[in-house]
Image: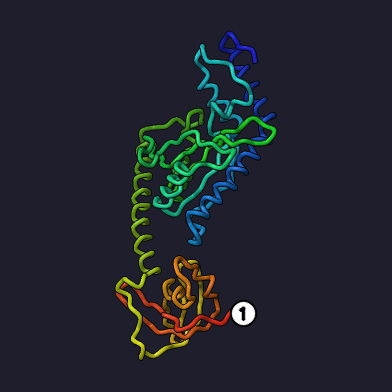
């Protein structure tokens, strides 16, 4: 593309450049987003290792609206001495043309994933270009999130820059609650002091809820996954057993109910002991919904637990 001399010529040239990029690069953008999402899903699986998969959820990728890309690129290239670009480099200048998100239940999981992606060598064809941490240093608007930029190789195409946003669900909802898109540069509404103050206050309140949710998650985790060396101890050998039915089951615990309606958690350590295996076990690999078990009841300050005396026979019918 030849360098335009006057403002109007440069404006027209940028218009043509963006239109050309969207026409030529759309297929590569879609493929790159898919490649990155597959890799990200595998990284989440490794981190969760059988835990609740909803702790890290992939959101659908998006391609930035062409008009917004055009507006952003115009502002970036408004300097008279800026260099001319090729269509294939639009996403190098506007790094969020192609974007995807991972939504986490807590800031703890957000940090866990961001640290892994920074430190873990990406797979072949995916290169980490850089990141911006808007959680440690929120934007003036109150926006929080971690942004990582990757260069993704796509066979037959020039590599694509893809922006990954890692947010908690509350951080993501802030944008919807404050109508953030209406106040961005190039948007139809100009930001007033009132808008700024309210949006920042909402962001701070949601950040406090995130902090409390982190504390709650840690406490609940210690409750549902007690270990043998904690205050929870098995009932005495002569304690009466009771029949319990498993209502739900997961990787770290199962929930059962006895004939009197008393509910209790079946902890992983009790399952591991009966399974005769060491290390980490996924409770749902050994205890299924509908299993009828004989168990003793143990109670402590944190909750009520059923300690099975045996696991259900393999092949028993689920109810």
- The colour scheme applied to this rendered structure is rainbow
Question: Split into 4 quadrants, where in the image is the C terminus?
Answer: bottom right
Total tally of numbered discs in the picture:
1
Residue at image location 52% in from the left, 75% down from the top = 287
Q: Nearer the viewer, residue 209 or 27?
A: 27
Q: Where is residue 246 drawn, in percent x and y?
A: 50, 78
Relative to 89, is 30 above or below?
below
What is the crowding at mark 1: few (fewer than 14 residues within 10 Å), some, or many (at least 20)?
few
Residue at image location 51% in from the left, 80% down from the top = 311
In this view, the residue farthest toward the top is 5
Tell whether 220 sits left or right of 36: left
Q: Where is residue 73 drawn, in percent x and y?
A: 55, 24
Q: Is disc 1 placed on a helix, strand or loop?
A: loop
Q: Nearer the viewer, residue 197 or 271?
A: 271
Tell whether 15 sits left or right of 170: right
Question: Split into 4 quadrants, where in the image is the N terminus?
Answer: top right
Residue at image location 54% in from the left, 47% down from the top = 40
Q: Where is residue 116 drawn, in percent x and y?
A: 45, 46
Relative to 47, is 310 above or below?
below
Relative to 38, is 90 above or below?
above
Residue to which mark 1 is pinned:
315
The answer to which image quadrant residue 223 occupies is: bottom left
Q: Where is residue 172 drawn, in percent x and y?
A: 47, 46
Residue at image location 51% in from the left, 31% down from the top = 187
């Amino acid at each position: 593309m030849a360098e335009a001399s006057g403002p109007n010529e440069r404006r027209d040239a940028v218009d043509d450049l963006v239109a050309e990029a969207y026409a030529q690069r759309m297929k590569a953008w879609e493929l790159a987003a898919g490649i990155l999402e597959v890799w990200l899903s595998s990284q989440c699986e490794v981190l969760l290792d059988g835990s609740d998969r909803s702790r890290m959820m992939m959101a659908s990728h998006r391609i930035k609206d062409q008009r917004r890309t055009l507006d952003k690129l115009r502002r970036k290239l408004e300097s008279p001495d800026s260099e001319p670009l090729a269509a294939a480099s639009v996403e190098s200048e506007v790094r969020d043309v192609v974007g995807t998100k991972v939504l986490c239940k807590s800031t703890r999981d957000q940090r866990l994933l961001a640290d892994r992606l920074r430190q873990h060598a990406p797979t072949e064809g995916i290169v980490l270009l850089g990141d911006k941490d808007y959680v440690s240093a929120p934007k003036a608007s109150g926006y929080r999130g971690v942004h990582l930029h990757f260069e993704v190789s796509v066979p037959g195409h020039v590599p694509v820059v893809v922006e990954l946003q890692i947010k908690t669900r509350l951080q993501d909802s802030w944008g919807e609650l404050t109508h953030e898109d209406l106040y961005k540069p190039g948007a139809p509404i100009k930001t007033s002091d009132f808008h700024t103050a309210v949006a920042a206050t909402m962001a701070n309140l949601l950040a406090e809820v995130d902090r409390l949710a982190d504390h709650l998650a840690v406490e609940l985790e210690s409750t549902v996954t007690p270990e043998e060396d904690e205050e929870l101890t098995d009932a005495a050998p002569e304690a009466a057993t009771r029949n319990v039915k498993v209502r739900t089951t997961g990787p770290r615990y199962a929930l059962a109910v006895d004939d009197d309606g008393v509910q209790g958690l079946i902890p992983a350590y009790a399952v591991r002991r009966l399974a005769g295996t060491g290390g980490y076990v996924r409770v749902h690999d050994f205890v299924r919904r509908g299993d009828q078990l004989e168990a003793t009841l143990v109670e402590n300050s944190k909750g009520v637990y059923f300690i099975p005396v045996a696991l259900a026979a393999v092949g028993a019918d689920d109810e």
